[in-house]
Image: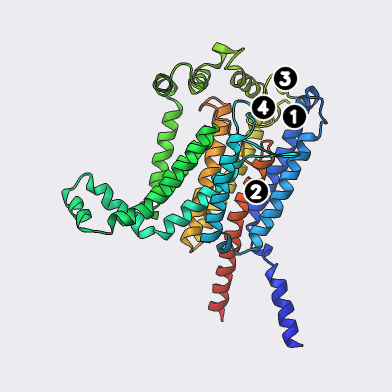
Amino acid sequence: MKLKKEKTHISINRFNYFHNMNGILFGVMIAIVLFGIMAIYSSSIYTAYYNGESQTRYIVMQMIGLLVGLGAHVFLICVPYKKYLSKPMIILALMFSIVTLVIVLFTEARLGASRWINLGPVDFQPSELGKIIYVLFLAYWFVKYEKSCYYDGKLLFSASIHPKARRRIQKDRGFWRRILMSWGVPLGVSLLMIILLYLEPDNGSIIIMLLVFLVLSVAMFVRSKKVRTLIAVALILGCAVLFMKDVIAEPVIKFVGEDSHIAVRFRAWLDPFADYEGDGYQLANSYIAIAKGGVTGAGLGKGSQKQGFLPEGHTDFILANIAEEFGLFGIGLVLIGFYIIISQSFKIAMRSEDKQAKLTILGLMTLFLVQIFWNAAGISGLLPMKGLTAPLLSYGGTSILFMVILLGIVQGIAVRTNKQEKAKIGEVSR
């Protein structure tokens, strides 16, 4: 009888993970998602009417993506994260991601890009999955080859300056083999994925992947004491760039050519009202929506820009609609929610003793932060728009699915970290 009771006790505890969840992280995620569903309904009503569709079509599709994502979220909490962050699972996921990125190139183009695979009632966007898998791969690889990444990478950099470093490399027969494994493989995977995304084209995802690679690469060389200094320098440089439109835009336009779609975006960014009826239409109407909202907003459902003036108002420009209906106050609450998600995630990373878990959260939060920042800066004209959705808010089944999964990975790491800390406290108390 005792044996049976012990077995029952163990089986119950296997599913007793939710006590160790980060409640703040989960609660804020759900709050933003629910607010997003309300905003999608409000901003898509006229689009649905003009298209002859049901007024609830967009929120129903969003709910399907959300429910599937929450199922995966729970799964990622209940299964030890080391199982799905293991080498076989990451390599299989990476191969699947690359295959889907190849398949999407042969699909019918929409809005000038081939980014979606039609799966009947829903569309699947491989780049959303690819960005997450890319982070998991880099985190695994850089930790596995940590010593080579740091010492050999540092030596290779020094070789461009110091003759002694070059002589050391010449004497070390295994140097280039180690460099090929530690840095060559991730660079090769990055190049392959960037080429596939460029062919779609999906320049926004390319920028995110480059920034993720930069952040995780720098993390291999920067010690924890210097992280705050590095972040401060990055923020100062970032803020300086935001107020240098003319300095940045003109050289870019000359480089890519006057007729390039990139040049079109940059000209619209410089002055959207100069071509209001053409390329500046979206951004100009985004400005108008933000201006109309003021501090307190027009009220839920009372925005006017969604009435055919602001295209993609429930997707890329959902923050503009939120600004019009809820004002600066509403946008402020949303941004505070995003800040809480990012800060809680970094707290989880700092408490974890697993280097791969730390680097995984750093990469995932870089992805999350860049997407939020670029979307918010894009609708307000601080940066050129890149077709990036607002995480957890914008309409898109694939987007909501994989953003909830992304936070499920973070939550899975939090659960194991909390369990380990409680186990240590129990051992000490004994």
User: Is 328 placed above or below 123 here?
Assistant: above
Q: Where is mark 4, residue-wise?
A: 312
* Quarter of the image with the C terminus in it: bottom right
Please indicate whether residue 90 sits to the left or right of residue 156 in the image: right
Q: Where is mark 2, residue-wise?
A: 404
CA distance for labels 2 and 4: 22 Å
CA distance for labels 1 and 4: 9 Å
Q: Where is mark 1, residue-wise?
A: 44
In the depicted view, which residue is nearer to us: 32 or 264?
A: 264
Q: Residues within 10 Å of mark 1 (few under 14, many from 20)?
A: many
Q: Residues within 10 Å of mark 3 (few under 14, many from 20)?
A: few
Residue type at mark 2 is: Val
Point 78% across, 39% down: residue: 60
CA distance for labels 1 and 3: 10 Å
Q: Residues within 10 Å of mark 2 (few under 14, many from 20)?
A: many
- x%, y% of residue 392? 65, 42
Residue type at mark 3 is: Gly
Please indicate whether residue 255 sits to the left or right of residue 137 in the image: left
- Kindly indicate the quadrant of the structure image that contains residue 397: top right
- x%, y% of residue 222? 36, 51
Q: Are circles 1 and 3 on residues that touch, CB within 8 Å? A: no
CA distance for labels 3 and 4: 10 Å
- Mark 2 residue element: helix
Point 28% across, 56% down: residue: 175
In the depicted view, which residue is nearer to us: 338 or 283?
A: 283
- Mark 4 residue element: loop
Q: Residues within 10 Å of mark 4 (few under 14, many from 20)?
A: some
Q: Where is mark 3, residue-wise?
A: 308
Tag 3 or tag 2, which sits nearer the N-term? Answer: 3
Q: Are circles 1 and 4 on residues that touch, CB within 8 Å? A: no
